[in-house]
Amino acid sequence: MKIRKITADCIYPVSEPPIQNGVVIVDENGKILALDRRKNHDAASLEIYPGVLIPGFVNTHCHLELSHMKSVVATGTGLIPFIKGVVTKRGNFSASIIKSAIEKAEKEMLDGGIVAVGDISNAPDTFETKSHGRLRYYTFLELFDFLQENNAESTFLAGQSVFEKLNLHPNSRATFAPHAPYSVSKNLFRRITAANPSENATISIHNQETPPENELFMQKTGGFVDFYGGFGISLDAFSATKKSAIFYALENLNPKNRTIFVHNTLTTKSEIEAAQAWSPNVFWASCPNANLYIENRLPNYQMFLDTNAQVTLGTDSLTSNWQLSILEEMKTITRFQSYVTFENLLKWATLNGAKALGFEDTLGSFEVGKTPAILLLNLKKDQRLRPETRVKRLI
Ligand SMILES: [Zn+2]
């Protein structure tokens, strides 16, 4: 058995405090055999790097199937014009352009140190790429019926026929997932919950990304009422719940499963606490670059720190981002809210994401028996992310 002993100025196991001059010892398959200190080893047996070693990144929110629409939809318009742009433009591409963009985007994630992805699918376009298992995928087969209770069953059946096309690699999983509170009827929520495992599964839902979401639920006014009207979709059967959008999700989701709320740019501290009281298995996926791309706003991360929230990171799609890089998401948070420490960001980018997807058996931290990949960051002694910080995958 060929053993590698890899060391850098500092190693971050994530599951325990950083180790100065630490050594990660792995077998030929990248499985962690032990963590140790440099002084216990003959220097000639070590691979020594300047910088820090961290486990592979987990991207908890992506739409790989939208990779071909890079730079197609304008930045800074707000969510509703953005959705209109995606809906009207996504069909204008050939199958070969869509396929090659998916392959290229997957390679970008692999090269950038991402080892697992929570990926939204509306169509089967990504299924062949995912079947190779180069990354660990959790596919969320996403459904929406524009709040039309009578369309829930036909929407579900159409989604089920896409789900059946999945050719899951053994390291991957899949569930049905509701798109967002403003687009999923109660009947469809019920159908989704009944079709998913009753526990130990992960669900994803977009949440509180733009002010009109709360307006719709509080007063049945605002941009979504106009949006639906513009498409000739009636909201006559929908009445305001008089509570913000996230409560509609909480009332209709299964608290025994893991729930990833995605975006949360407008979520308040009391809403975070309400969700955490509803279930201990709540995760908050933040996609700061997509938030800047679409709405030019960011969540207030202090509220998530104050509530001990399990934050994860996501890239969203190339339709709403300039790249698919978890490191770039970490840099953006550092740039605009630099009180969030590197160690916090690292936990969000690795172990929290692995837990959210139920992949912490192999990924997310340097722990004996895991195969989390080993990434090198060229951080200086102050351990600050800078625009020029780069990631290199060593294993
Ligand atoms: Zn999304």
Image: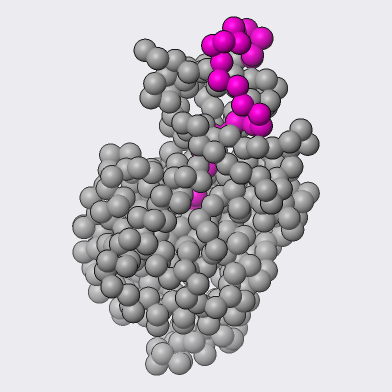
Position above or below: 131 against 245: above
| Residue 116 falls in image quadrant | top left
Q: Residue 274: horizontal and vertical position, in percent? A: 62, 56
Which image quarter: residue 176? Answer: bottom left
Q: Which of the pair 207/49 is nearer the observer?
A: 49
For the residue pair 234 and 208, the one nearer the viewer reads as 208
Residue at 49% of width from left, 49% of height from top? 59
* Residue 210 appears anywhere in the view: no
Residue 23 lies in the magenta stretch: no
- Residue 243 x %, y %: 60, 72
Give how far across and how far down residue 199 sits, in percent.
39, 45
Q: Which residues are magenta?
A: 37-60
Colour scheme in the image?
A: one colour
Q: Is residue 4 above or below residue 389?
A: above
Which residue shows up at 30% across the image and 62% down it?
A: 99
Which residue appears farthest toward the front when viewing the image? Answer: 44
